[in-house]
Image (tube, rainbow, N blue to C red):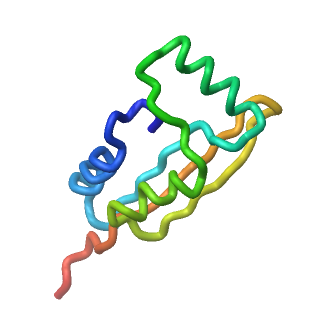
């Protein structure tokens, strides 16, 4: 997500093509982890196209603002250096057509 030029448009497009009842799962770096300033600087130095690393609440808002349901944001560390978050959400609707 930190590479998306327009993340709301990207999430809207994912919502458009996701089937009813489908799930979206995205993992990204987490702003607010103590190593964030170093990770952000490193990404900008190595890959200038890095746009932004999000806070968990901002990450969740991307899902909410584009109409996803059942949004959950999990924050975790995979070791002392890497603070990550995984967002999961679903597209409302059912795959089973009504009778």
Foreground pick, 23 / 68:
68
Image location of residue 71, percent across then percent down: 49, 65
Quadrant of image for the N terminus: top left
Foreground pick, 93 / 77:
77
Image location of residue 17, percent across then percent down: 22, 52
Residue 69's place in the image compared with 87, above or below, is: below
Choose top left, top right, bottom left or bottom right for residue 63.
bottom left
Residue 6's place in the image compared with 97, above or below, is: above
Left or right placement of residue 7 versus residue 46 in this view: left
Quadrant of image for the C terminus: bottom left
Residue at the farthest bottom position: 99
Residue at the farthest right position: 80
Residue at the farthest left position: 99
Q: How many marks?
A: 0
Residue at image coords 25%, 75%: 96
Image location of residue 10, percent across then percent down: 30, 44
Residue at the farthest top position: 46
Residue 34's place in the image compared with 13, above or below, is: above
Residue at image coords 62%, 21%: 41
Image location of residue 44, percent across then percent down: 53, 19
Residue 61's place in the image compared with 3, above or below, is: below
Choose top left, top right, bottom left or bottom right for residue 49.
top left
Residue at image coords 46%, 59%: 61
Left or right placement of residue 34 versus residue 4 in this view: right
Residue at image coords 63%, 41%: 31
Foreground pick, 80 / 31:
31
């Amino acid at each position: 997500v930190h590479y998306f030029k327009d993340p709301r448009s990207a999430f809207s497009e994912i919502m458009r093509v996701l089937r009813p009842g489908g799930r979206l799962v995205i993992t990204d770096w987490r702003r607010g982890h103590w190593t964030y300033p170093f990770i952000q600087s490193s990404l900008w130095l190595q890959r200038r196209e890095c746009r932004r690393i999000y806070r968990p609440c901002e990450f969740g808002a991307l899902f909410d603002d584009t109409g996803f349901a059942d949004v959950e944001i999990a924050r975790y560390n995979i070791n002392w250096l890497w603070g990550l978050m995984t967002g999961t959400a679903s597209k409302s609707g059912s795959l089973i057509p009504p009778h």
